[in-house]
Amino acid sequence: MKIPIFGITSATALVLALAAPLALTPILTPPAHAFFGGFGRIVYDPTNHAENLLTAARALEQINNQITSLQNEAQMLINQARNLESLPYSALQQLQQNVQQTQQLLGQAQGIAFDVQKIDQAFAQDYGELSHSATDQQLLTDARSRWETSIGGLQDAMRMQAGAVGNIDSNHTEMSTLVDESQNAVGALQATQAGNQLLALQSQQLSDLVAVMSANGRSEALLEAERATAAEQGRIQRERFLTPGRGYRPGNARMFSE
């Protein structure tokens, strides 16, 4: 913002006060072409007087230009300071809490955890090729274990969905605050920091979405694995039933122990 020639600030007044003797010197100095008449009187020379006024005006204009330049430099420094001012608000703590909650839910997975080695071990033990020499009771026990794993996977998926939905309220609050901070930013740094935090919020929401999709996919995979293993178990039991010499013997059957 520029200030008129006859400035109103103390800095402008000080500069003008210091520059006034220089600007007025040509006026107070006796004209170069003036001459003294009788009795020591100064004879007025209009041409020389006009030149002196023009010189004083140019000097004053130069001083005003210097003042304007100093004011522009001061405003530039103020703007630079604003651009370097840091954003007073941070959503990092809330975003980290949301991510930690999602990680805790993933770590509490029942049955088969989200670990490659543990998945391989569990499938080799419970969903691999069934032993034809296993007893009927052992087959029923294994079927019960697979059923519990599938039910646990479904429960984990629903818990993960509930956790993601629970984060919506806090994410909405953080998003509104960050948008306000971005719109009211006083400098480039604040606007950039607000934008970075909005990107972090988006990343946290994407991580929730990935976690929900992973939990849903896990539950579906467990159900399919249970169906495939149950079909193989049924084939084995059917072969035993139809094997000559063993035949069918009626008796009391209990699917699951209470």
Image (spheres, grey):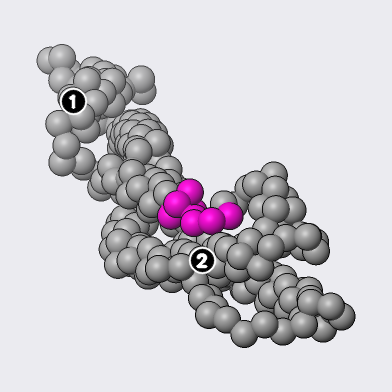
Q: Is residue 243 above or below residue 194?
A: below
Residue 175 x, y percent position in the rendering: 35, 62
Q: Which residues are magenta?
A: 105-112
111 sits to left or right of 124:
left
**Can residue 119 be seen at all in this image of the molecule?**
no
Question: Which one is nearer the viewer's eye here, 218 or 184?
Answer: 218
User: The residue tagged with tag 2: helix, strand or loop?
Assistant: helix
Identify which residue is drawn at 46% across, 68% down.
Answer: 257
Question: Which one is nearer the viewer's eye here, 69 or 191?
Answer: 191
* Residue 147 sits in quarter: bottom right
Extreme residue in the right direction: 244
Between discs 1 and 2, the one toward the N terminus: 1
Q: Which residue corresponds to mark 1?
A: 14
* Residue 80 sits in quarter: top left
Residue 22 x, y percent position in the rendering: 28, 20
Mark drawn on residue 255: none
- Which quadrant of the rendered structure holds the C terminus? bottom left
User: The residue tagged with tag 1: helix, strand or loop?
Assistant: helix
Mark drawn on residue 148: 2
Q: Amino acid at mark 1?
A: Leu
- Mark 1 and mark 2 in contact? Answer it, CB < 8 Å: no
Q: Amino acid at mark 2?
A: Glu
**Can residue 182 be seen at all in this image of the molecule?**
yes
Identify which residue is drawn at 34% across, 38% down.
Answer: 85
Q: Decide whether the magenta segment is chiefly helix, strand or loop.
A: loop
Residue 86 x, y percent position in the rendering: 35, 38
Q: Is residue 90 inside the magenta stretch?
A: no
Q: Is residue 108 inside the magenta stretch?
A: yes
Residue 19 x, y percent position in the rendering: 26, 23
